[in-house]
Amino acid sequence: MSDSSLEIPEAAVRRLESSAFSSGLTVPDFAACLDLGLQPVGLVQGFCVMRWGWYGAGSGYMRGINPYAPGPQNNGGYAETYRCPHGFVSNEHRMWGQNVEQTWVEEAWSEGYGSAYRRMLDEAVSLGAHGVIGVTDRINPLADTGTTEFHFLGTAVKVEEGPPPAGGVPWTTYLAGQRLTKSIEAGFMPVAVVATMASVRVWAYCMTEYLMEGSRGWGGPTSPYEVEQVSKAHMAVRQLARKQVRQQLSGDTLHGARIEVVNRELSQGDEVIDCTLRGNRMRRFKDFDDVPPPRPTVRLT
Amino acid sequence: MSASGAIDARAEMLSGAKSLAVAPPPSRARGVTSDLSIDEALLLHGAGWEPVDLVCGVSVVSVPVGVWNWGQGEITVASVAHNAAVKGASDQLRDECIKVHGHGVVGVRVEVEVRTHHIDVELVGTAVRPIDAKNLPASPFVSDLSARDFTLLKGAGWLPVGLAFGASFAYAPRRSAGDVMKQKTQNIELTNFTEAMYSARESAMERMQRSALDVGGQGVVQVKVTEGPMHFARHAVGFTAWGTAVRLVADSHQFVQPQVILPLDDAVVTFEAQSLRST
Amino acid sequence: MTQPQDLPKDAAHRLEELEHGLFTSDLSVNEFLLVKEAGFHPLGFVMGSSIYHIGLQTRKWGESQELTKLTEAMYTARELAMNRMEEEATELGADGVVGVRLDVNYYEWGNDSAEFIAFGTAVKAEDGNSYRNAQGKPFTSDLSGQDFWTLMQTGHVPQGLVMGTCVYHIAHRKLTQALGSVGQNVELPNFTQALYEARELAMTRMQDEAGQLKASGIVGVRLEEKSHQWGSHTIEFLALGTAVTKTTGEVTLPKPITIISLDN
């Protein structure tokens, strides 16, 4: 289990105590930041390496989930069962299949992300910062071992003459520079960067296996055919990611959302689909003023 | 806001910071997710529309073994499969849009992967609707226009009606050894090759046109043509044509009357001083 | 000039559909609006292609020279593609084609052959006048929608995409001999002469085409140099531009606002 109360490394303490600040901002972003009345106070980062089991130790499958039996067994997560229409029994013929939401993978991912994020916030708090801008998050899976590193980097800032945020928890955003200025002017205040990951494992049944390998099996249709189990898994993973994100929003808006899907095809039609969704959670602090319609121009360069 | 109408960024930032100093009451509102940038969200709002939610559509269609082996003319099975996958994904996208009460989807990002045994199509976009819309349209539109292009077109009196799409796959014709020797030193057009590739390309475009007509479009803009051999079967070539079908909804086209500007920049100067609303 | 050949029947069918009122274009939304602003309406996306086999040509390795057979092949192949594109435009009743792009594709199964493709959007004037060129054919131009609008505002009209090509063999052996005098600053006269001549040939041929169209000038000239698939000893020099003539209309380009943009 990871522990977000891990001490900030000693080197970091020394760096953060020095009075000169370092910031990850480019010159234009730095200028825009000062323009907003934000004072950079230091570069902050958070890091965490998580490991979870795909198939062996630590995985849901070792804890007794059987993909070849009907019914959801993953803490009520998404699961959908498929049953062979052929009525033919043999060792080679996969009579059952299931799409299973790998909730243990999602939990481990969230924990890793959360720990790295909280460590970055701890560094920011030690500097007395109100917020962190220009956050970059690097999420790197290391080979195929189910080990992933989470690394956050951002520039901690103080709002000049501003109050600290409620609970002393700094607000964070991926934005910086002109893009941040525009959202403030539009009435959106950044609250936090949010990210979530949904993971679905496809345990193929006979029809899916045949279709993904280009054969029809016997008794199947002979024209191009939608591979329903796989399509459903893809749709489900994206829907799950969005549902998870919405739970973190509490009515705020997610701007600049990015969906990334990675799927790994295993043998015999099996595959694992991971969907990551991230964006800036923002809150309206004033009504939309009417923006005058922009004027179209043609440039004579 | 100062008298000149320009915005005081500092004051706004302070306002924002103050709003976070107090914990908000718990909200049961359904948060909006959108992949639009702030600029796009504002432009959309200026046109009287707002983002509703991020929506997706995915379809995986299998292609039987042996389809890519060398034959003649069009690889019909592949074209049909490709078409089915795009249609399946668009239908899903449209269903999601209806579920969140959107009137249409903009900024659709299209990803198509053609593999040996299956064709995968993924669509992601943002569902939008007129602010405070009460009624739902009969059928929401799907377009790969960015939110910016959507507002520009709308200002000119046009609206997107749907994605126009067409694809065709063809085998490259064979040349006999005798032909190869005869043609070695000549500058000569290879007419049956030309015919095969030309036909396949035109076929993809024609299907795109027909799909535009099917959704009630009067025209297609931003046509993008892709073509190339399959990595797993270099003698099979695929052509696709994509665009957005549009329709004039105003009485006549509204001219934009652009302003001509002459920038005097030379080198890159690194300080951005433009506010959203300063004149 | 080669004779235009018949278009495949799929093309005829597609164009017929366009004649019933549907328009297609590969113009971006910005370009679409500006083409309308210039008083034109897009009719349809047009294209022409030709798969051409380029014959072997013997050459003397020690001398720099034009490879006339290759020049002719590159020229003819592109002409075939352009002519077919123009035929499609004529079929639609267009006044011209904007945004023309010329591409060359190499397929692995086509040794020594390549596909030459020309694409563009056919347009028609909304004021009922004909803007076809001196040869009575729709004008072609590689101008973007923005450049087309700007050009029309200056009182000029495109006549046609003009091109000149020259495939030149560069005798590298002479070059390595010359490098025997390494360490000195020296111009390599033979090398310079060869490249100079090749570029001039390409540009002169392009200008001749403009002359045939009775143009008053050429805008947007681009000089491209490619080795295609022939290795580094052989380069094709391609000069492309849009030939234009002045109309009798007045210049309507409004006085531009000068701005100093302080961004990158």
Image: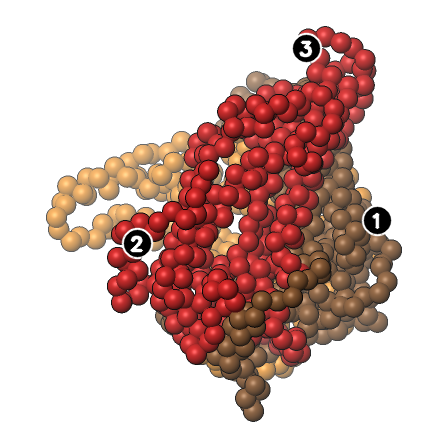
Q: Secondary structure at mark 3?
A: loop
Q: For chain C, give the colour.
A: orange
Q: Is residue B278 above or below residue B195?
A: below
- The residues tagged by marks 1 and 3 sit, at their Cα atoms, a distance apart of 45 Å
Are both tags, 2 and 3, on one chain?
yes
Q: Which mark is residue A92?
A: 3
Work out which residue is located at the far top of the displayed protein and give it: A90
Q: Residue at x 42, y 40 (%)?
A: A49
Label 1 belongs to which residue? B214
Residue type at numbered disc 1: Asp
Query: Can you say whether A77 is above or below B140 in the image?
Result: above
Q: Amino acid at mark 2?
A: Ala
- Image hue for chain A: red
Give the letter of the brown chain: B
Find residue A69 and report its horizontal and vertical position in percent.
71, 21
Q: Quadrant of residue A205?
A: top right
Q: Looking at the image, which is closer to me, A147 or B24?
A: B24
Q: Residue at x 79, y 47 (%)?
A: B95
Point out the image quarter for the N terminus of chain B. Answer: bottom right
The chain letter for the residue carrying disc 1 is B
